[in-house]
Image (spheres, rainbow, N blue to C red):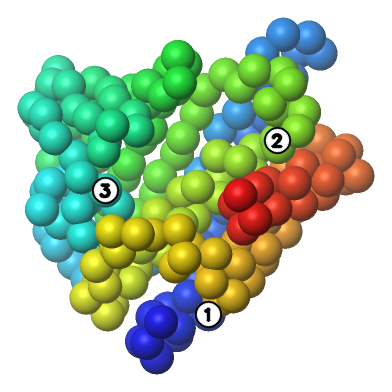
Amino acid sequence: MNDDIDAVAAAQPGAVTRRAEVRDPGEGDVYVAATLSQVYRTDVADLWQAVTDPSRLARWFGEVTGDLALGGRFDLAGYTAGTILECEPPRRYRTTWEHDGSTSHVEVVVEREGDGARLTLTHSGENARDFYEQFGVSATGLGWDLGLFGLAASLTADWIKPDDEDPFFVSPLIRTLLTSAARDWAEASIATGVPEERARAQSERSARFFTEG
C-alpha cells in the first residue's frame, strides 16, 4: 500500500460511526441491522455519483450490472443481486440484497454535512440463528466497513480496488482496521442489550473470519 492508502486505512476505524439493532425472539431467525455512517470530503453530487454510477462503483466496490433505475434488477459481480425498491436522487435509495438464498435490505442515504457529505448505510434482515450466534451483527458490519474504506480510499487517494483483492484485504493495516472495527461492533451490540461476553466473542470470531479466511 502507498502512503496515501496507509493514511486512509489508519484513520478509517475512527471515521465511521457504527450502530446496531438486534431483535432476538429466543428461537428461530434473529433480526439484525448494522448502520455505518461517515463524512467524506466531497459534495453530495459527487458522493451520490460514487455510490450509484457503475463506473465509479467498479473502482471501489465491485462490478454492478443491470437496470439501475427504480424497480430495476442489478447484479454485483455474481456475488449478490437485488431490486431497487426506492430511489430519491441524490439523497436516498433502498434495495433488496439477495445472497445465498436469503434476502435482506440495504438503504443508502447521502446528506450534506458542513463542507462535506455524509453517507449512512443500513443493512438489515433476518439472520439464521446458528449464523447469528456465531458472528452476531459484526459479520454484516465488517463487510461494509471494508466497503466504506474502499469508498474513502477512492475519494481521497483515487484508489482502484485490485483484481486480486485477497492479498490486499489481509494486509497488516487492513487487519488492524477490521480488528478495531470489530471492537466497535461489540460495543454497538452491547448497547442493544446483547450480553457483553457474547457480543465480544461474536465480534472476535467475525474479525478472524475476515482476516484469516
* Location of mark 1 (residue): 10
Residue 205, horizontal then vertical, whole percent: 75, 46
* Location of mark 3 (residue): 62
Residue drawn at (32%, 41%) of the image: 108
Q: Residues within 10 Å of mark 1 (few under 14, many from 20)?
A: some
First-in-chain label (2 vs 1): 1
Residue placed most toward the observer, 146 or 14: 146
As drawn, 23 above or below 177? above
Query: Which amino acid type corresponds to the residue marked 3 in the rendered image?
Result: Gly
The secondary structure type at the circle numbered 1 is helix
The secondary structure type at the circle numbered 3 is loop
Residue drawn at (47%, 16%) of the image: 102
Residue 48, horizontal then vertical, whole percent: 18, 52
Q: Which mark is residue 136?
A: 2
Residue drawn at (65%, 18%) of the image: 128
Left or right relative to 73: residue 11: right
The secondary structure type at the circle numbered 2 is loop
Q: Quadrant of residue 86?
A: top left
Query: Which amino acid type corresponds to the residue marked 2 in the rendered image?
Result: Gly
